[in-house]
Amino acid sequence: MKKIIEPFWWTLFGAGGAIAALFIPVLLFLNGIAIPLGWIDTPRYEVLYALIKHPLIKLCLLGVISLSLFHWAHRFRFTLYDGLQLKHLNKLIAGICYGGALAATLSAVVILLQF
Amino acid sequence: MNVNPTDVKFELKWYRARMPIFWWVHKWVHFRFILRELTSLAVAFYAITLLFYLRSLAEGPQMYEDFLAWMKTPLAVGLNIIAFVFVFFHSITWFNLAPKAISIRFGKMRIAGISIALMNYGAWIVITVVIFWFFIIGL
């Protein structure tokens, strides 16, 4: 089981790392800094709503959210093992990390289906 | 595969010196390693922000306004600036490591590591410019 599951987590980690590296800096800069500080106009509600209704955009948003969180889950798990020497809590930490990513993925699906 | 399956329970126990919890603060390379690993927290922070952003949009214009008002608070802007620095660091370290993880071959020719890194940076610039342009012109 371990031989199958560890490469699986690693693949999600890798895919999420790449997606996060490519997309998050620009999205975070726009939504978290430039728009709140008024450097760029705030997107109108109707325009954003219509945009998110598109199935392709939904898929992209789900991909960014889910893969980024699985990237976090895998990396943070090992940061806790190595950085804080918590290897003995292996199962608990892995459960919280991957479980959290899975829960967020499911809630993203539920939210995106409302559009 | 074990030659003798019964020897499993006599597996060697390695001696490992106990490491202090803050072993990584003394040397810059170790500290930078932990900083790089901690970028995953900023990545998760933005993914969760995006989730709340979408939820506010799903719930109607009023909730969207409330979300925008929260994003304008000094706390939110401060957190986002810190997260941005970490996410930026993630991108750079990720692209620089990519050649070590990816190996592309054309027949017998192996694509040089520097080209793989440059392809990653190229894709990053294109995606950034397109999304930027989209927010300025399209929305």
Image: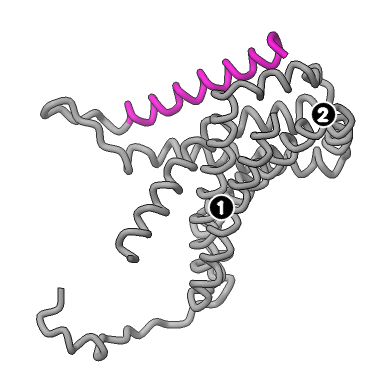
Camera-nearest residue between B26 and B87: B87
Q: Quadrant of residue A38?
A: top right
Q: Please, which residue is most extreme toward the top here?
A: B137
For residue A36, which numbered disc appears in the image?
Answer: 2
Mark 2 Cα within 10 Å, few/some/many (few <14, many 20+)? many
Which x, y percent locates residue A36?
82, 29
Q: Residue at x 34, y 54 (%)?
A: A7
Residue receiving disc 1? A102
Q: Quadrant of residue A97?
A: bottom right
| Image quadrant where one finds the N terminus of chain B | bottom left
Which x, y percent locates residue B11?
25, 86
- Say what amino acid the circle numbered 1 marks: Leu
Q: What is the secondary structure assignment of the residue under circle 2? A: loop
Which x, y percent locates residue B47?
64, 42
Query: In the image, A93: left or right of B101?
Result: right
Q: What is the secondary structure assignment of the residue under circle 1? A: helix
For residue A91, which numbered disc appears in the image?
Answer: none
Q: CA distance from mark 1 to mark 2?
A: 30 Å
Camera-nearest residue between B28 and A94: A94
Magenta extent: B114-139
Identify the subunit bearing mark 2. A
Q: Are marks 1 and 2 on the same chain?
A: yes
Is A85 inside the magenta-drawn segment? no
Q: Is residue A39 visible?
A: no
